[in-house]
Amino acid sequence: MTGGRMKKSKEKKRKQSGIFYLFHPEDLQKKIDGYGYSFSMGRYVMFLLTALTGTVGCGILFSLHWYYILILAAACLGNLPFLILDGYKQMYEHKCFLDVSDYMEQILYSFRMNPKIVSALKDTGSLFETGRMHHAISCAVDYIEQGKYRWDLYGEALEIIEREYPANRLPSIHEYLRMVESNGGACSGAIDLLLQDKAVWADNVLLLQEDKKAARLKVIFSLAVTMILAVTFHSVYRSMPEQYSIVEHPVTQAATALYLLLNVLIFRKANREIAGSWLVQENKEEEKLSEYYRIVTEFEEAKERKKSLILGGTVLLAGLGAWGLGHPFAALALAGAGAALLNQHKMGYRLAYDRVVKEINRVFPAWLMEMALLMQGNNVQVSIEKTIEHAPAVLKAELQRLSDRLKSRPDAIEPYLDFLKMFQLSSVQSSMKMLYAISESGSGDAQAQIQILVQRNSKMLDKSEKLSNEKSLAGINGIFYLPQITVSFQTMVNMVVFMVVFLGQLKI
């Protein structure tokens, strides 16, 4: 009986996650209801009619045959549920961001007034009378008050909120609250630090979303301009004498239909980019960055130069052979390729080095912020050890090496100075010297020096957030050029067809 219910549940889950799931209006409505918004069938019908009218209008405008119009209509209607859902998902992500931003700020203020996690959660929960955040906070409070846990009462309770709102700043705040709950001590300075960090994060998230919306408008503008250009060329073809007309040519018809279909997909891609999570920035380049770091740190110039000489020399010899056989253009191309291959080891190293440096500048301030928080209740060596497990790819190996060296030479400055030394980053070197000074000072001086470290880090943190924004914007900024590529493709195809038709008429 239970197995049957589980099987039906799995089948339902597969059905709801399938590619055709959203095509049913009721399923689309349920999905939007899950985001906390209402969506009527009347509005859906209005969207359908608008999409169909636009598709038929474009088909008539470009003189497409009925079957191509039918294909375009099917494509538009197939993408319509996803476009609608993306619009509501964008509003939902905005609300999630506002909820978690308010939560982080309020729980820090409440904890400063009364450094007890349960009290701070209850005080913060009063801001959210209903909704997802209210439910998450209530569950966390109930979990703590029941007192049953597996390994860490407060960690498991706060993880309920972290699962619902996977903001990258939230675990650091919760970790600090747990540390103070366990160890006690003054927390005003660290809370000021967390509030400052939260403000930088929130400002840059909002800036990123504004930039994404502006980029989406640019994509729409690019689509509109290229459509006008395509219509202009089409009107020229329609005005030609019948014997030279290419409007009814099968290749022209297919190319035009493909052009319009690609524009639909480009528009959907642009909408999907702005409907992504505001809280989570996926880093899909961890493995690639690890490889870049390995190339830089394990680079052996003599060995790599030898490889380049073999590759480049082989291609240059092939170029000489081509010259001897009377193929000067092939020889010239091979000579250029050979010259590039002779220096490929230098170019590869420089590419990897620049990528690693940029990534270090992006992630180091966040690591330093985590260190400043951990040092409120731990010494420098222990704090470094605790950051290794979740450290970014370009820092993990260096942090492990630093930790190992400090275990054998805890009072030496050399392990600190050697951290990322080969990259010669003044901000990193300055911060590591400060960490060494903190490790050598008394507890009273250490707190003052931590504050100085944080002040130095604030500008770096803002800069690193902007670097992260640049990475996130790369995708949608690249979409801007796609309409120009598609209209160029369509224009070239039509020009080739026209030349074929024109030359054919001359022969006749």
Image (spheres, rainbow, N blue to C red):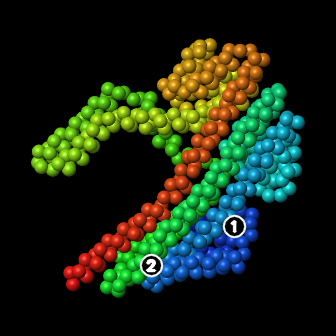
Horizontal side of 79 relative to 326 (left or right) equals right
Horizontal side of 119 relative to 46 (left or right) equals right
Please tell me which residue is depicted at 64% across the width and 76% down the height of the picture. Answer: 47
Relative to 35, say whether 209 is above or below.
above
| Helix, strand or loop at mark 1 | helix
Question: In terms of depth relative to the viewer, which is nearer, 313 or 324?
Answer: 324
Please tell me which residue is depicted at 67% across the width and 67% down the height of the picture. Answer: 31
Q: How crowded is mark 1: few (under 14 residues within 10 Å), some or many (20 or more)?
A: many
Relative to 325, say whether 34 is above or below.
below
x then y, percent, for residue 186 = 83, 27
x then y, percent, for residue 220 = 57, 64
Question: In terms of depth relative to the viewer, which is nearer, 54 or 182?
Answer: 54
Circle 2 residue: 235
Q: In which quarter of the image is the N terminus?
A: bottom right
x then y, percent, for residue 214 = 62, 56
Please tell me which residue is depicted at 57% across the width and 34% down the height of the picture. Answer: 361
Q: In which quarter of the image is the C terminus?
A: bottom left
Horizontal side of 329 relative to 8 (left or right) equals left
Question: What's under tag 2, amino acid-wise?
Answer: Ser
Q: How crowded is mark 2: few (under 14 residues within 10 Å), some or many (20 or more)?
A: some
Question: In terms of depth relative to the viewer, which is nearer, 298 or 455?
Answer: 455
Name the quadrant containing residue 115.
top right
Residue mark closest to the camera, 1 vs 2: 2
Asked if the residues shown at circle 1 and circle 2 are in contact, with their CB atoms under 8 angstroms apart, the answer is: no
Q: Is residue 149 visible?
A: no
From mark 1 to mark 2, how far is it between C-alphas? 42 Å
Please tell me which residue is depicted at 38% across the width and 76% down the height of the picture. Answer: 252
Circle 1 residue: 32
